[in-house]
Structures are given as structure tokens and as C-alpha cells.
Amino acid sequence: MALLQIAEPGMSAAPHQHRLAVGIDLGTTNSLVATVKSGSAACIADEQGRVTLPSVVRYCEEARTETGYDALKAQKIDPLNTISSAKRLIGRTLADLKQDSHYLPYRFGSNERIIEMQTRQGAKTPIDVSAEILRALKTRAENALGGELTGAVITVPAYFDDAQRQATKDAARLAGLNVLRLLNEPTAAAIAYGLDNASEGTFVVYDLGGGTFDVSVLQLSKGLFEVKATGGNSALGGDDFDHRLFCHLLEQNKLSQLNEQDSQLLLSLARAAKEALTTDNSTTIQAALSDGRKVDSTITRQEFQNLTQHLVAKTIEPVKQALKDAGVTKAAIKGVIMVGGATRMPHVQQAVATYFGQTPLNNLNPDEVVALGAAMQANVLAGNKNDGEWLLLDVTPLSLGLETYGGLVEKIIPRNSTLPTARAQEFTTFKDGQTAMTIHVVQGERELVADCRSLAKFTLRGIPPMVAGAARIRVTFQVDADGLLSVSAREQSTGVQAQIEVKPSYGLDDETITRMLKESMANASDDMAARARAEAVVEAEGLTAAVKAALELDGDLLDENGLHAVQTAVAELENQMQTGSAEAIRAAVSALGHATDDFAAKRMNRNIQRALAGKNVEEL
Ligand code: ADP
Ligand code: MG
């Protein structure tokens, strides 16, 4: 559906030219980069053939940095200069972290607006750290693909707020990456599974990573994604399974008081054992500690599962909550997508299957799926896929506007505006002494409210009574990156305001949008006529109201004939307002104008006399 094809400004590609675009999963524990080559998405490996890059950066001597595995290895010997989990800190302040910052090994600066960590290379922010990770992935991709990248789609958790999203974009800019778009991680996973081509349905994305558990409920309707609810536990992930096994090894080998080096060794062996038990039925952990003591344990998958079953169980509570928040029952879930390396563990798979009563979608690598979906999206945005039926919430698919007097639509945000976007416009009151104004928010391309889709209505009250046209009401439309529209109205002199939030795309599928667009084109000339007529009616209403008010006050100035002439002209205009064309109404307006010329002159005289009464010439 070409109409809805999304191309970023200045990025539409020549038909046969393939642009290099990547998807990046910027993870808390691991980050990945993927691209679409000959139609299928794949992760790009480093020179050692590893696709994941640990999200760790070490600031070394002589302005050198290490990123990934090297930095991870050095973390224990150089903790103050080696930063991990920057994603937990990005776009946040020390105040946001509260006492949590005490648990982190860094030397935090005192900057209140942005988190800073003192390293031997000076203060580094989570943005700097993330930029290093992105730079490493960019270099990896450019080496593998043999050219400069056109752009990247970077994924973020669905719950990231504006500050966290903006900070992620800033990191990309620092790394020299052109961000085609930020994409929600669960949405990326759904794209990787091709669910955007599925008909309709509600899906759950269960993401158990290294240190975090995120669950999202996604509603898909013909290629359109909406995150209905998110939940999770920011302090639960694969690391906790490592730690549990580590504690078990200490008990089993009657070890207490390990030095830092030994406990690191044992912890990394525990992690390796955990990962091995995903495929093997048992594994052996052997190590020689620095004081000569030995660790020698064999652990079966069953034992490991018994040790960690409570951690698996802990993930189900947030799942229940998210379903509740989304207002859906688990029976209504069409599919469950497994994301995150830790979901490889068979007892995690089992628990999810049991809870939902269905086998989760797990045929893609759970640690790659987010990057793969992002790559597919990047491919479309870079203009490499022209036949796609992609509809994304990142542009406004239809214009957004409000109802003005006479049932007309005033468009505020035009169709295809790139999100986020905001626009404001001033309106005024139509009637004298009007103290309230109803804001009716509509969506569509047509000129008349009746032909558009009504989204919401709210009323601004407390407008000070003024003559018609004197009040200044500023109406602001704002659509955020998630497609959430908020409309606010503010009376400028008193500052009274009212607002409302709506999801404009909710429930709109491609077909409805196409139909609405086609109708607007087909009806363009009729709509113009209807608009002209409605505008004439508005003008006529103003005039008849003014003439009637004047007759009430000063009708005695007219003789019977004069009065009759004015009344006849009013009646004729009212008649034309009901049934006449725009031209007929305008003609009747002008006839009424002529019919009242004499009356207007008489009123003017009377008003001057009233004003002069009791005043002497000197005062004037
Ligand atoms: P994040 O999204 O937090 O960056 P990942 O999705 O990369 O994290 O998940 C990392 C976690 O997945 C780690 O705890 C790691 O040990 C775990 N993991 C990776 N492979 C396996 C496996 N084969 N079996 C069990 N856990 C695994
Ligand atoms: Mg992840």
C-alpha cells in the first residue's frame, strides 16, 4: 500500500540501490547488531564469530577504551573505570536512582541533571558509555558490510520515557549513527516473528534478560502494533540464576569467605554451568581456588531447576498484572514470544507454556530476536523494501484536527507528520459572553466533522465573559513518539486550561485508513463546496443574531415598513441557511446588509445622542 509507505525525509532510495541499514539491540547485559541481506535478517558476528557484545565499557590509560568481552573480563580488576548496565542509568538522574546508587560500584558525580561517573578519563555519563557500545557495533557492521551505514533502528524497552529515549538518541548521535527510529523491544520481537503480517490478535512478549524481566502485552491489527501494557521486575534476570547456583556451590563445597577473585571465578563458572544445563542433563564445575582449596561439583539439570524454580515462579506475577492492566485474559492471548537469553532455560519455557496453556514462540534465537526485528524495520525505513505493507505508528496516518463552528474541521496536525510532533493554533469564542468551549478532536482528511472520525471531546470552562471574538484560546496538539495524542486548550488571559489524551491510531487498520483517504480524494470538490457553504452559514448566523439583538434594543426606531423590510430579509436569510447554496446564502447576507443600512444609521445617531447626553462641549 504505497500511500502508507514510510520514508524518512531525504531518504527515499533509488530503486535498485541497496542502502546499508542495521538494527541494534542496545541491551542491559548484551548488545547486538543485525542487518537484512538478500531478504533475510541475520546478526553480524565479530571477528571471533560471536554475535553478542557485552554492554560493558572500560576507560583505560591513555584515552583508550575497551568495549565488550575485554571490558567484561577487566571489570573485577578495574571496577571504577569499567561501566556495565549503563542502560539502567541512561536518561535518569541520581534522584531517580535514590538509594539504589549505593549498590553500584561507581563514583557518582554531583550533577543533578545527568548521572556522571568519575573514571580515569574524567566524568562519563551513561550516554557516553552507550555511545561507545554503539560505536563498536557500528564499526563491526561497517567492516562486515563494506560501507558506511545509512542509518540504524535502535530498540528501547517499551516502558522507556521521553528522557530515556532522548538520551538513547543522543548516544547514537555521539556514535555517529543516523537513527532512523527508536523501536520498542517487544514490537521488534513481534516484527521478527512476522506477526505484523498476521491478521489480528493480542500477543505477550516475555523477555528475561541478564538482569531484568520485562513483559509486554501487544495488540496487533493488520501490521499495526500497539503496546497495551508493560510490566516486569527490574531486579530479576539470568544473573539471579547464576547467583543461586553460586550459593549452592559454596554450601556444597563448604566454602565461606571467598576473596573477590575467587568469587568472580566461581560466579562465571556458575553462569557457564547454567548455560550448559540448557542443553545438557548434567555438568561438572571444577576450580582451584587461590588458597589451594578445590571445588568439584556435578549438578544435574533437575537439581538446577529445583534450586531456581522460585525465580521462574517470580516472573508469573508481573505477567498476570500486565494482562490485567491490558484488560485481557490469558485465554485471549494468541501467542507468547520468548525474548532474552535466559528464556533458553527449559524450565522457563515450561513455566510459560503451563501458564498460558500453549507452547511459546521460540524458534528464533531469543537473544537475537529483538535485533532481527529492528534490522527488518531498518531495511524498510532505508527504502530497500518498496512492496511492503508496513504501517507504523511513527507518522500520523491521518490528519488530526478539531471541530470549529459550523461543523467544519480545522486540521492542526497534517497527515504523515513524523512523530513526535506538536502544533498550536489560536481560536476564539463565537458568542458574546461565552464562558465554555467544547473541543471536539477528530481524525481524517474530510472537511466536515460528520465525515471524519471522532476521537474525543472535552470542555474548557471558566473563560471570562467577553464579546464574541475577543477571547484567545490556544489549542495545542501533541503526538508523542508512541502515537499518544494529547490536546490541551488554554485561555490566554486567565490561564484556565483543560486537556485530554487519546490514542488516535487505536482500532484503525490499514483498510480503514485507505478508505478514509480515498473518500477524501473522491469527495474533494464536494467537500470544498460543503466547506464554503458551512462558512457562509457561520457568517449568516452571526449576522442574524446581531440584527435580532439590535431589533430588540432599538426596533422602535423603525416604522412599520422599515421593520417589515428587515424582518423579511432576516426570514429570507434563515430560509437560505436551511437549504440554499453557499452563493445563495451570501446573496441573502448581502441583501440583509442592505435592508439594515438605514436602521444601522438610525442606531448610530441614537447611540451618539446617548453618549453626549449630560456632557458639555468642553468635556468632548
Ligand atoms: P539483556 O537483554 O539483559 O541484555 P540477554 O537477552 O542477552 O540480556 O540475556 C542474557 C542472559 O541470558 C544472561 O543471564 C545469560 O547467562 C543468559 N543466557 C544466554 N544463553 C543462555 C543459555 N543457553 N541458557 C541459559 N541462559 C542463557
Ligand atoms: Mg534484551
Image (cartoon, rainbow, N blue to C red):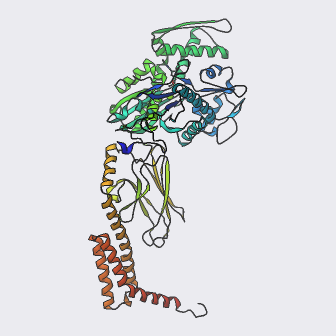
Task: Compare residues 384 and 444 and report the one nearer the observer.
Answer: 384
Q: Relative to 561, say whether 411 is above or below.
A: above
- Quarter of the figure with residue 390: top left
Point out the residue furthest to the bottom here. 617
Task: Compare residues 487 and 36 and report the one nearer the observer.
Answer: 36
Q: Is residue 34 visible?
A: yes
- Quarter of the figure with residue 56: top right
Q: Which residue sits at x=49%, y=32%?
A: 20
Q: Which residue sits at x=39%, y=50%?
A: 398
Q: How many marks?
A: 0
In which quadrant is the C terminus drawn? bottom right
Give how far across and how far down residue 148 sits, in percent: 54, 32
Give how far across and how far down residue 412 sits, in percent: 44, 56
Q: Which residue sits at x=34%, y=70%?
A: 537
Q: Relative to 517, say whether 263 is above or below.
A: above
Q: Relative to 286, say whether 138 is above or below.
A: below
Give how far across and how far down residue 168 sits, in percent: 56, 37
Q: Relative to 171, say whether 567 is above or below.
A: below
Q: Is residue 509 visible?
A: no
In which quadrant is the N terminus drawn? top left
Task: Compare residues 124 and 524 and report the one nearer the observer.
Answer: 524
Give how far across and how far down residue 364 sits, in percent: 41, 23
